[in-house]
Each structure stands twice: as structure tokens, then as C-alpha cells.
Amino acid sequence: METSGGIQASLAGRYASALFDLARDERQIDAVSNSLGLLAQALVDSPDFAELVSSPLIGRDEAGKAFASVAKELSIDSITSNFLGVLARNGRKGQLQAVIRAFRRLAAEHRGETTAEIVTAHALKDDQLAALKQQLRARAGRDVAIETRIDPEILVGSSSSWEAR
């Protein structure tokens, strides 16, 4: 059951494919995409939420309760909220970020878009993202969905990159 681009091959890809199929069947791709965007931003903005997702010390029940609380606080749609519960119950909360990336690729493909992952040392401003998206669209000849990731380590000469050597 391989999807295009090999997304289905990974564990996160299988979860993302299942979520995408449900969202498509319920005609809620945009709602789920928006909710996943809120979760992705929460992973960046909230060290507590990032710790919840990554910590092996947080059990399935506790993770399920915490995910339910976060879903309510962020006004996450019901499909995504239920999906978070599935991740927690199955002990797969650590796959959330990878599931988000894989779902975004599936949604972009569904819309006929190409996806570009942009890694920067600092967050880009909205106008910078818009200009980049426009340039990529001109080069690709179609819409480009942009996934951003911040990695301060890519700065040459940053103190942390020197210390790591």
C-alpha cells in the first residue's frame, strides 16, 4: 500500500495516510490541515508541549489527557482531536511532528501543489515567506506549499556550532 512519494513507507506516513483518508472522506482536509498547523506552531511556541510529545516518561493515559486539553485549548477540529487520542493510546505521540509533515505533503499533493521544506536559522517574516513562495511558484510552474523549520545550528560561526566541534 505505497502512496506516491513513498510517504506510506514510514510509521508516521501510515498514520498520516490514515488521517488524510479520513479527512478526505469527511471533506475536512482544510480543517485538519489548519489544526495540524496549530499543533506544529504549539510545538515551536510551547516547550511544555514539545516535552509532552518527546518525553518517554509520559505514559499513554497521561498523554491522552494532555492531548485532549491541548486540543480543547487550541480549538482543534474533532477529527484531529480524536487522532491525537489514537496517537497517545498507541504510544506514538513522538511521531506527531513527522505525521504533520507527511500529512502536509499528502494534502499538498491532493491540491496539485509541490512541497518545499525551508530550513532557516531564524523564523521568516510573513512577507519573506510570501516572496519565497512566489519565486518557487515561478520556478516550479505550480503552487508550492512551504514547510518551514528553524535550525540555529546552520549559522556558520554560531557559538553552539563551534562548541560542538
Image: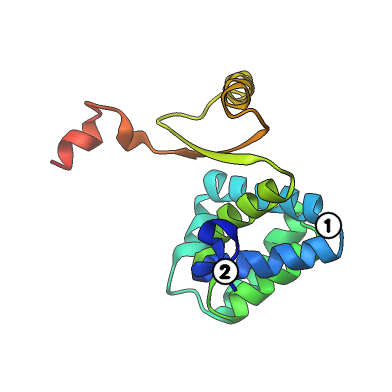
Q: Nearer the viewer, residue 95 or 39?
A: 95
Q: Could you tell whether 120 is left or right of 37 in the image?
A: left
Marks counted in the figure total 2
- Across and down, in percent, residue 26 comes to 86, 64
Q: Is residue 121 visible?
A: yes
Amino acid type, mark 1: Gln
Is residue 62 depicted above or below 74 in this figure?
A: below
Work out how far the residue at label 1 is from the one at label 2, CA to CA, in angstroms: 23 Å
Q: Quadrant of the N terminus?
A: bottom right
Is residue 57 depicted above or below 140 in this figure?
A: below
Residue under the image location 78 percent in, 62 percent down: 23
- Mark closer to the chain start, 1 or 2: 2
Amino acid type, mark 2: Glu
Residue under the image location 67 percent in, 31 percent down: 142
Quadrant in the rendering for residue 12: bottom right
Characterize the local packing of mark 2: few (<14), some (14-19) or many (20 or more) Cα atoms within 10 angstroms.
Answer: few
Disc number for residue 90: none
Q: Could you tell whether 1 is left or right of 155 in the image?
A: right
Residue under the image location 24 percent in, 36 percent down: 160
- Across and down, in percent, residue 154 comes to 32, 33
